[in-house]
Image (spheres, grey):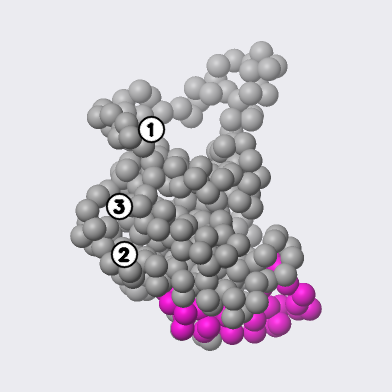
Amino acid sequence: MTLVEQQNKAAALLDLHSGRQLLLLPNIWDPIGARVLATKGYPAVATASAAVSSSLGFADGEQVTRQTMLDVVSRITRAVDVPVTADMESGYAATLDELEATTHALIDTGAVGMNIEDSLEEGGSLRPLDQQAERIAMVRKTAAARGLHLVINARIDSFVSGPFCDNKERIEEAVVRAEVYAQAGADCVYPMGPGDAETLTELRARITLPLNIMATPSAVPLETMAAIGINRVSFGPFIFRSCLKKFADIADALGRSESYECFSREMLSSSETAAYLRSTPDDPAAA
């Protein structure tokens, strides 16, 4: 991919956050998932770190190596022509130098967007605000030096981490962090957790940047999110878990010597599967 092609994809991804239409990102974890979405007309695809890690047999939370995650992202970007945005958790970086290296490496995969989160550990404290702002600014500076406007989606974990007493405190923290992250160079903010109409309406009214919300099974419908003014909706690990449930059910059924209907009942044909496949070899240098 040339720099101009990558710049054009980044501009297209950023434009999808304009609010003209809800940007739906059913998060994927492999190239075939990306191809399914691109074939069905989705204008961009996004990875989910938890889904990628789970598909490789590991827990979320940077339990796979940075290089492993980047290899997966690279295969996905080569599989489709639409923009790809990657969930890079906390950047696989304890220091700014390490974050700079991660940003360079992500750009090298062909991705044009990056999720970066602000919690230090699941359910624990949040990274100090000034430190997280510095990290977002580092990502922006590094990408700019490469001539690319990498679309930064800054995750805000006040609803799932930190010593907050109630929802009001979590909202206040999210609003403060959103403003600081915007000044640091974020293009979109991602308050992880809330899915009720009241909280989403207040966040939308008080945050100027585009908003990414995760559609949990208990979240308000997509139509309601669109009406509130949410810009981007992702699905985290839930689609992966739904697919895994079907596989586990098939395994159970075969173990009970049930009929082949357990897998043949809702199965793509060979020709239907072929619609999502390419016949040309992958880049051997990246295999």
Please give the label number shown on residue 82: 3
Which residue corresponds to the image point at 65% horizontal and 66% vertical from the top-left? Answer: 119
- Mark 3 vs mark 2: which is more N-terminal? 3
Identify residue type, mark 1.
Ala
Q: Is 175 in the magenta?
A: yes
Closest to the camera, between mark 3 and mark 1, is 1
Q: Is 159 in the magenta?
A: yes
Closest to the camera, between mark 3 and mark 2, is 2
Q: Position of residue 286 (x, y in %)?
A: 36, 37
Identify residue type, mark 3.
Val
Which residue corresponds to the image point at 32% horizontal and 31% vertical from the top-left? Answer: 284
Instruction: Give the residue pinned by disc 1.
Output: 287
Q: Are marks 2 and 1 in contact (CB under 8 Å)?
A: no
Q: Quadrant of residue 156?
A: bottom right
Packing grade of label 1 (10 A; few <14, some 14-19, many >=20) is few
Judge from the rendering whether residue 115 lies leftward or rightward of residue 79; answer left or right. Answer: right
Q: CA distance from mark 3 to mark 2?
A: 20 Å
- Mark 3 vs mark 1: which is more N-terminal? 3
Q: Quadrant of residue 129?
A: bottom right
Which residue corresponds to the image point at 54% horizontal and 77% vertical from the top-left? Answer: 133
Range of residues picked out in magenta: 158-187
Decide: is 103 above or below 173: above
Identify residue type, mark 2.
Arg
Instruction: Give the residue pinned by disc 2.
Output: 146
Q: CA distance from mark 2 to mark 1?
A: 25 Å
